Amino acid sequence: INIYNENTIFAEYKFDSGTGDSLYDHSGNRNHGIIHGATWVFDYSLELHGGANLKSFYALPEDNSVVNVMLSLGDNVTGVITEGGATTQLSPNFWVGSLTEISCSKGYWIIVNNNATLDISDASACGNSYNLHEGANLTSFPSSGSANISDALPDDIENSITGIITEGGAT
């Protein structure tokens, strides 16, 4: 929605970017709005290559079951592994294992046979806080983008982190 007169745009609201009760003005005029009683939902996609893909989710649908979240992959997905849990798809939509739900606070290895796109629909943004334990932690990065490691980690824990391993990289 654009709010303008014949010569000037005052605000541009896309209704696809905001948090809480804030609606962001994309015109550059900083005329941000407030929405009452709304819930932000997102549709997004994650590109997967054949093999194991390290992924996390910054928004999930209300039904965050493995069956529902992995549904768009069909029988191309063979398994999902997270810290302390795993599941295998034996036949379409029939999963066995200790992992039954996907969480925004965890990282996941998603195993697919071929390149694919995982589509997530009607998802609500997650507000994550983490309880890290000694040793390796498989956590998520709850963002649609990327960030410099020193900007992403709170200053008070940086000295406690001895390494970060990502799919295809390590520091």
Image (tube, grey):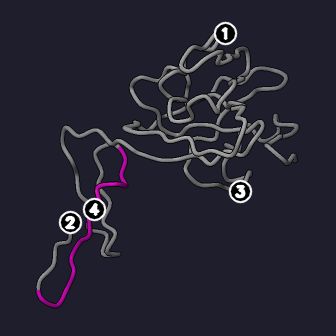
Give yes or no for contact between labels 1 and 4 (Cβ–Cβ under 8 Å): no
Residue that badge 1 annotates: 97
Residue that badge 2 annotates: 1
Is 16 magenta? The answer is yes
Q: Which is in the foreground here, disc 3 or disc 2?
A: 2
For the stretch drawn in magenta, the main secondary structure is: strand
Q: Element under label 3?
A: loop
**N-terminal of the two: label 1 or label 2?**
2
Q: Where is residue 95 in the image (x, y as percent from the top left)?
A: 60, 14
Residue that badge 3 annotates: 148
Q: Residue at x 50, y 20 (%)?
A: 65
Give yes or no for contact between labels 4 and 2 (Cβ–Cβ under 8 Å): no
Q: Where is residue 94 in the image (x, y as percent from the top left)?
A: 57, 14
What residue span does the magenta drawing correspond to? 6-19
Work out how far the residue at label 1 is from the one at label 4, CA to CA, in angstroms: 46 Å
How many numbered circles are shown? 4
Amino acid carrying mark 2 in the image: Ile
**How dense is the environment of label 4, judged by Cα within 10 Å: few (below 14), some, or many (20 and up)?**
some
Work out how far the residue at label 3 is from the one at label 2, CA to CA, in angstroms: 33 Å
**N-terminal of the two: label 4 or label 2?**
2
Is 39 magenta? The answer is no
Q: Tell me, for residue 32, which label it has, or none.
A: 4
Amino acid carrying mark 3 in the image: Asn
Q: Which residue is drawn at 71% across and 23% down?
A: 82
**N-terminal of the two: label 3 or label 2?**
2
Q: Where is residue 99 in the image (x, y as percent from the top left)?
A: 63, 14
Q: Is residue 96 above or below residue 68?
A: above
Q: In this view, does 95 lie above or below 16?
A: above
Q: Position of residue 147 (x, y in %)?
A: 66, 55
Q: Which residue is drawn at 87% across and 47% down?
A: 171
**What is the quadrant of residue 136 in the picture?**
top right
